[in-house]
Image (cartoon, coloured by chain):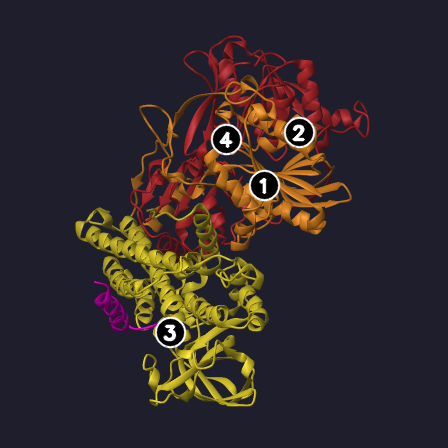
Chain colours: A yellow, B orange, C red
């Protein structure tokens, strides 16, 4: 048993951390305040290898695994969870194409997605609900070799910047009347396909969240990602593994931000003639944050390593559930440690809390994660 | 164009304040402080990569050379990940305690060996001028002297055209332009460029690049020419700088402090 | 090397006051100030306009005059000449000395900043001898100008034999086209951009550290320096923060040593590699919101405040 990262993973983390410190950290507060999506940084993320870190080299990627992908997301989220949301959703859609797409699709789209010239998206949720698959209404009708798609997706990350979006569409019903879904890639600029409303979010700024409108969008059958009719298992697998791992990694980044800021503040701030860090009440809070961080870290990287080894179960759900709740707790603790400074926007503590809360429902609420964990647990024990 | 870059691993300068002197032994305690590539070494490597790219990356080579304990190997892997083609680490107990004279002598010996092995001479050797730990500004110049090559340090702008090296350095009041011929040794400063990031692809590529570790014997040097024994300067006691001043508190508020500061300035007759 | 064995000292004069400062220090250690009775011979090698000949002439002079000690200002030229001479004469070079003294055993002792100035260390050059001199560089301003109201040149003239390379080049004693082996040739000079408010001559220096926190505060600090008629300076950390501090305004082991009448430091933790550069200030005032900041131990006056608040208050007071 060995809980250490490899030398190469350590070096990779240092490289990503250096990049995040120089290119993300100085701007993160401004992106948040102005609700600005820094598209100019995407090619740099491509160059760093973050956009296509887990994509094989033959498609322009780095050829590493999900542990390394989580390292990248954690380092980005350390300074900007909002930007990390863009990267994670990009990975999500990209993973669907990588895992299920045709060779032709991979060659066409993956190189641009790796070098940062094309952001990818994945669109499932609709106004009628996200986790309630049966409630999805976006429909694709096949006529010869052409899909005609109509519908509306909402709360879609990268809605306004994705070059390619993988969209889950209802493409029929089985004999019991349950919907049959397919995943279809739609390129930006396709006639009838356009972003709608852009949401004004509480947190996770630095990435687009909004609507996608499909009004008689015509795409070729060859844009189907995976087998027609298999849309739901494909989407669920990517959300369940890539999605939840990503969310846990982003939450871990927030947790580390809370931890580092709490320690720095407690050491610097002088109260009653000595640093805050000497006060036991403060120490307890710091210990709690540390434990939340370490537990989340172990759960996430354990799950990621399991995925890289090809045997992941409910581990990502556990990691996602635990880390998202832990990030919210820790951000709140940080604010309490910092007192008035925690509440003013001059310091990022408030942003961490807003971002952490935003992470909870992404890729399945805590309740959904617990259902998944319970389901597996009841079978296994 | 063939360029060699001297890389110095140093304790992370951002953590310098954690370095302490152990009173009992008089030695420096730097436990837990990670080693990093000296910032100016990084600038030197970036300058080398840019020059190689300018003159045709495929026809050029950029090698990295360091003298350090074997644990510092990953710093050379990092240099390879940044873009160097091959790396050499000189690692031997015999090198311990070397001053700049012995260090540069050992480095020069390794340069000769690399050139002999490869069958070419480096057009340029680049290094940082002043490392964050020792900061003597000696090693680039002294390595050049051992190799009998022309040298310049404190260079903030560098270009090479047809064998002529043009360098600009800042003096106290002026910008000075210099010319020299290859093969030359150039010490750069931090304002010469912004070093590129190490990328994930770079790290993967570094896996396949050669990294050679040499002992004293392998480069054909020995105890009395290197390390502490080969050093004309010998270290004495180490101590924390004296800083004996009164440290009188001023003002109860920022405004009162400001008023007192102005008072002190006036008293000094300014 | 024992201090008493030093009979001849070569001092390199590049045209700034450092030569006189070095001579003053040498007098303190070896001369009348030392109570030794036997003053060593001082030779000044003057190359103020003949940059490209400097290293070669130093080389030649050491061969001919065989001094036991060579003192060189740690300027752009001196920093390069000293280590080159070290290799040529197979001898040790003590870089950026903060002190030169005789220790209790009578050995000539160089005190140099080590490990980024976190510590200072003594070093010895035991093998030094006539013609194989100990070499030391010293930052301009590290030692005081000689007292007594004499100008630097008068002081030098009164105490030393001068080898004037400039004059020799001008009247043809050094053939035209001579150049230094091994060094680059200087081919052009232009003034530097940031010359105004130079920290070398300023009576008041307002210095900012990483604790300023932002470019905005750094800009306020520059404004304050202007209003006080002083110069703005920075620490390495502030320079690296990328707020636009000029590199030539950096104080410390990797920057300059300064000797202003008043030094006011804002948001400076007081790492020794910075404080090494300000020990020559008459009065040091430090403002830092960390009451345990190390800088306070090196300060005459201290204020535990947020840097920006005090800068604002000062700007307000001055009006």
C-alpha span from label 2 to label 4: 39 Å
- Image depth: mark 1 or mark 2 in front: 1
Does the magenta run of residues contain A363?
A: yes
Q: Counting other residues with Cα less than 10 Å from the Cα at mark 1, is it few (<14), some (14-19), or many (20 or more)?
A: few
For residue C144, say whether it is visible: yes
Are the numbered discs 4 and 1 placed on the same chain, yes or no? no
User: Looking at the figure, which quarter contains the N terminus of chain B?
Assistant: top right
User: What is the chain letter for disc 3?
Assistant: A
- Image depth: mark 2 or mark 4 in front: 2
C-alpha span from label 4 to label 1: 46 Å
Q: Please, is residue A144 above or below residue A79 in the view?
A: below
Tell which residue pokes out farthest to the front in this image.
A175
- Image depth: mark 3 or mark 2 in front: 3
- Find out whether the residues at labels 2 and 4 contact each other: C-beta distance under 8 Å: no
Range of magenta residues: A362-381
- In this rendered view, identify the residue nearer to me: C124 or B122: B122
Instruction: Provide the residue designation for mark 2.
Output: B112
Q: In which quarter of the image is residue B101?
A: top right
Instruction: Provide the residue designation for mark 3.
Output: A236
- In this rendered view, identify the residue nearer to me: C277 or B31: B31
For residue C196, say whether it is visible: no
x 27%, y 55%: residue? A295
What secondary structure predominates along the stretch shown in magenta?
Answer: helix
Does the magenta run of residues contain B246?
A: no
C-alpha span from label 1 to label 2: 18 Å
Q: Please, is residue A113 above or below residue C242 in the view?
A: below
Mark seen at residue B210: 1
Label 2 secondary element: helix
C-alpha span from label 3 to label 4: 70 Å
The mark nearer the N terminus, 1 or 2, is: 2
Instruction: Provide the residue designation for mark 4.
Output: C142
Are the numbered discs 1 and 2 placed on the same chain, yes or no? yes
């Amino acid at each position: 048993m060995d809980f250490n990262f490899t030398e190469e993973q350590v070096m990779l983390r240092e490289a990503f951390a250096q990049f995040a410190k120089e290119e993300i950290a100085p701007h993160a507060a401004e992106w948040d305040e102005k609700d600005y999506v820094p598209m100019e940084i995407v090619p740099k993320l491509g160059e760093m290898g973050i956009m296509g870190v887990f994509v094989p080299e033959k498609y322009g990627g780095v050829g590493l695994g999900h542990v390394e992908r989580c390292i990248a997301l954690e380092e980005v989220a350390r300074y900007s969870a909002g930007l990390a949301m863009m990267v994670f959703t990009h990975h999500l859609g990209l993973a669907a194409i990588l895992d299920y797409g045709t060779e032709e699709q991979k060659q066409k789209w993956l190189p641009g997605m790796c070098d940062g010239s094309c952001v990818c998206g994945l669109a499932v949720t609709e106004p009628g609900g996200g986790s309630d698959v049966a409630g999805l209404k976006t429909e694709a009708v096949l006529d010869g070799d052409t899909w005609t798609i109509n519908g509306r997706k909402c709360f879609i990350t990268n809605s306004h910047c994705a070059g390619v979006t993988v969209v889950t569409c209802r493409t029929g019903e089985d004999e019991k009347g349950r919907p049959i879904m397919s995943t279809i890639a739609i390129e930006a600029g396709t006639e009838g396909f356009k972003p709608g409303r852009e949401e004004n979010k509480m947190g996770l700024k630095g990435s687009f969240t909004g609507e996608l409108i499909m009004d008689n969008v015509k795409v070729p059958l060859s844009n189907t990602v995976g087998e027609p009719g298999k849309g739901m298992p494909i989407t669920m697998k990517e959300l369940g593994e890539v999605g939840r791992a990503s969310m846990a990694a982003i939450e871990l980044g927030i947790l580390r931000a809370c931890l580092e800021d709490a320690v720095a503040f407690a050491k610097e701030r002088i109260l009653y003639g000595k640093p805050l860090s000497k006060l036991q009440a403060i120490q307890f809070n710091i210990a709690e944050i540390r434990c939340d961080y370490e537990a989340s870290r172990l759960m996430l990287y354990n799950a990621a390593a399991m995925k890289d080894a090809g045997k992941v179960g409910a581990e990502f759900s556990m990691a996602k559930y635990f880390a998202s709740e832990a990030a919210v707790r820790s951000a709140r603790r940080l604010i309490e440690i910092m007192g008035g400074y925690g509440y003013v926007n001059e310091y990022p503590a408030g942003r961490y809390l807003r971002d952490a809360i935003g992470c909870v429902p992404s890729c399945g609420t805590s309740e959904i994660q617990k259902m998944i964990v319970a389901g597996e647990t009841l079978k296994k024990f | 164009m063939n360029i060699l870059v001297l890389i110095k691993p140093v304790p992370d300068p951002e953590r310098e304040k954690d370095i302490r002197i152990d009173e009992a032994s008089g030695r420096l305690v730097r436990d837990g402080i990670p080693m990093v590539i000296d910032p100016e070494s990084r600038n030197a490597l970036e300058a080398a990569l840019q020059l190689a790219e300018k003159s045709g990356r495929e026809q050029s080579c950029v090698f990295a050379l360091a003298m350090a304990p074997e644990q510092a190997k990953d710093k050379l892997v990092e240099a390879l990940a940044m873009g160097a083609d091959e790396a050499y680490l000189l690692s031997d107990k015999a090198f311990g305690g070397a001053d700049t004279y012995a260090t540069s002598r050992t480095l020069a010996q390794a340069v000769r060996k690399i050139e002999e092995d490869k069958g070419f001479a480096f057009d340029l050797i680049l290094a940082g001028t002043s490392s964050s730990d020792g900061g003597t500004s000696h090693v680039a110049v002294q390595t050049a002297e051992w190799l009998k090559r022309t040298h310049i340090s404190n260079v903030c702008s560098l270009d090479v055209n047809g064998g002529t090296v043009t360098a600009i350095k800042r003096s106290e009041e002026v910008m000075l332009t210099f010319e020299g011929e290859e093969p030359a040794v150039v010490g750069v400063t931090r304002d010469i460029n912004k070093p590129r990031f190490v990328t994930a692809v770079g790290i993967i590529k570094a896996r396949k690049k050669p990294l050679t570790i040499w002992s004293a014997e392998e480069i054909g040097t020995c105890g009395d020419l290197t390390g502490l024994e080969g050093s004309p300067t010998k270290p004495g006691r180490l101590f924390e700088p004296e800083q004996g001043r009164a440290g009188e508190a001023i003002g109860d508020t920022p405004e009162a402090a400001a008023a007192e500061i102005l008072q002190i300035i006036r008293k000094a007759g300014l | 090397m024992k201090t008493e064995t030093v009979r001849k000292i070569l001092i390199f004069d590049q045209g700034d006051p450092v030569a006189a400062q070095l001579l003053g220090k040498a007098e303190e250690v070896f001369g009348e100030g030392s109570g030794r009775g036997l003053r060593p011979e001082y030779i000044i090698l003057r190359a103020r306009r003949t940059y490209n000949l400097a290293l070669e002439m130093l080389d030649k002079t050491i061969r001919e005059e065989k001094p036991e000690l060579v003192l060189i200002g740690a300027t752009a030229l001196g920093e390069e000449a000293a280590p080159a001479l070290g290799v040529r004469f197979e001898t040790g070079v003590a870089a950026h000395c903060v002190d030169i003294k005789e220790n209790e055993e009578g050995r000539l002792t160089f005190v140099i900043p080590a490990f980024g100035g976190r510590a200072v260390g003594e070093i010895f050059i035991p093998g030094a001898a006539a013609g194989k001199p100990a070499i030391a560089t010293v930052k301009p301003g590290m030692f005081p100008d000689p007292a007594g109201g004499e100008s630097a040149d008068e002081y030098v003239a009164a105490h030393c034999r001068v080898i004037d390379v400039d004059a020799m080049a001008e009247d043809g004693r050094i053939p035209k086209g001579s150049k230094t082996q091994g060094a680059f040739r200087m081919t052009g000079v232009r003034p530097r951009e940031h010359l105004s408010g130079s920290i070398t001559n300023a009576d008041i220096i307002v210095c900012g550290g990483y604790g300023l926190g932002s470019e905005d505060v750094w800009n306020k600090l520059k404004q304050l320096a202007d209003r006080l008629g002083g110069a703005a300076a920075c620490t390495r950390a502030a320079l690296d923060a990328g707020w636009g501090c000029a590199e030539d305004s950096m104080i410390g082991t990797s920057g300059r040593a300064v000797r202003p009448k008043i030094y006011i430091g804002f948001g400076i933790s007081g790492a020794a590699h910075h404080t090494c550069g300000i020990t020559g200030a008459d009065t040091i005032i430090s403002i830092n919101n960390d009451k345990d900041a190390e800088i306070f131990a090196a300060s005459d006056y201290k204020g535990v405040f947020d840097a920006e608040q005090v800068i604002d208050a000062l700007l307000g007071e001055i009006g």
